[in-house]
Amino acid sequence: MGFTLTIGEKAPDFTLEATDGKIYSLKDFNDTEILVIFFTCNHCPYVIGSDEVTRKTALHFEKQGIKFIAINSNSKNTYTEDSFENMVKRMEKEKFPWIYLYDPDQKVALAYGALRTPHFYVFDKDRKLVYTGRGVDNPKDTDKMKVNDLGNALNEYISDKKITTPVTNPIGCNVKWEGKDPHWMPEDACDLVS
């Protein structure tokens, strides 16, 4: 098994606090046919650059009953901007249409094999992985993007079509692991497609 979840694997459970003050686990989303879980943060230029496209994608698919959950696993000791307090401030300001969870011990990031911010995972009603990777092909500057891989995967899936490209490489900053150099990645972390 590689570092990152592979297609067909089940979503690992979690119990994490959200910026709304509530605690959420996977079972809290049992009423959702398709669940998009993505690893993100407050400071990364790839996240900030693509947040509005992610917002539009989330709002578009919300009508089909698809929910988005964001998880910040970055060490606040690497970037203070990524603290829980700053997550709350960011959600108050941006009013994103997703639940924003905090993973301070980074166990959830490790369970999913999160590589970068942002890194998207799409799970079916049985919570099996059907898509993983990037949201778009140019998250830092979406004016230049040509492909919304996440949107394409969701469109194909809800249309009962086979997902043409179920795995892409996430594009962004690496997860900021506690006590490590900001550019460090776990030894078994690697690109998802060569």
Image (tube, helix red, strand yellow):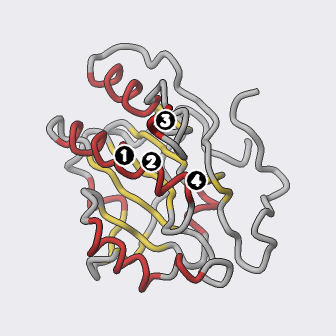
Alpha-carbon span between mark 2 and mark 3:
8 Å
Looking at marks 2 and 3 on the same chain, the residue that comes earlier in the sequence is marked by: 2
Instruction: Name which residue type carries label 2.
Output: Ser
> Closest to the observer: 126 or 147?
147
Alpha-carbon span between mark 4 and mark 3:
20 Å
Alpha-carbon span between mark 1 and mark 3:
9 Å
Between tags 2 and 1, which lies in front? 2
Q: List the residue tagged with mark 3.
A: 136
In this rendering, the answer to whether 48 lies above or below 4 is below
Alpha-carbon span between mark 1 and mark 4:
20 Å
At 36% from the left and 43% from the top, the residue drawn is 53
Looking at marks 1 and 4 on the same chain, the residue that comes earlier in the sequence is marked by: 1
Considering the numbered disc 1 on the image, is that residue within a helix, a strand or a loop?
Answer: helix
- Image coordinates of residue 3 in percent, x first then y, are 72, 48
Q: List the residue tagged with mark 1.
A: 54
At 36% from the left and 73% from the top, the residue drawn is 90
67 with respect to 191 (left or right): left
- Image coordinates of residue 107 in percent, x first then y, are 60, 69
144 with respect to 167 (left or right): left
Residue neighbourhood size for the residue with mark 1, other residues' Cα within 10 Å, grouped as few (<14), some (14–19), many (≥20): many
Q: List the residue tagged with mark 2.
A: 50
Considering the numbered disc 4 on the image, is that residue within a helix, a strand or a loop?
Answer: helix
At 56% from the left and 61% from the top, the residue drawn is 44
Disc 2, disc 3: CB below 8 Å?
yes
* Quadrant where the N terminus is found in the figure: top right
Q: List the residue tagged with mark 4.
A: 112
2 with respect to 141 (left or right): right
Considering the numbered disc 2 on the image, is that residue within a helix, a strand or a loop?
Answer: helix
Disc 2, disc 1: CB below 8 Å?
yes
In this rendering, the answer to whether 75 lies above or below 50 is below
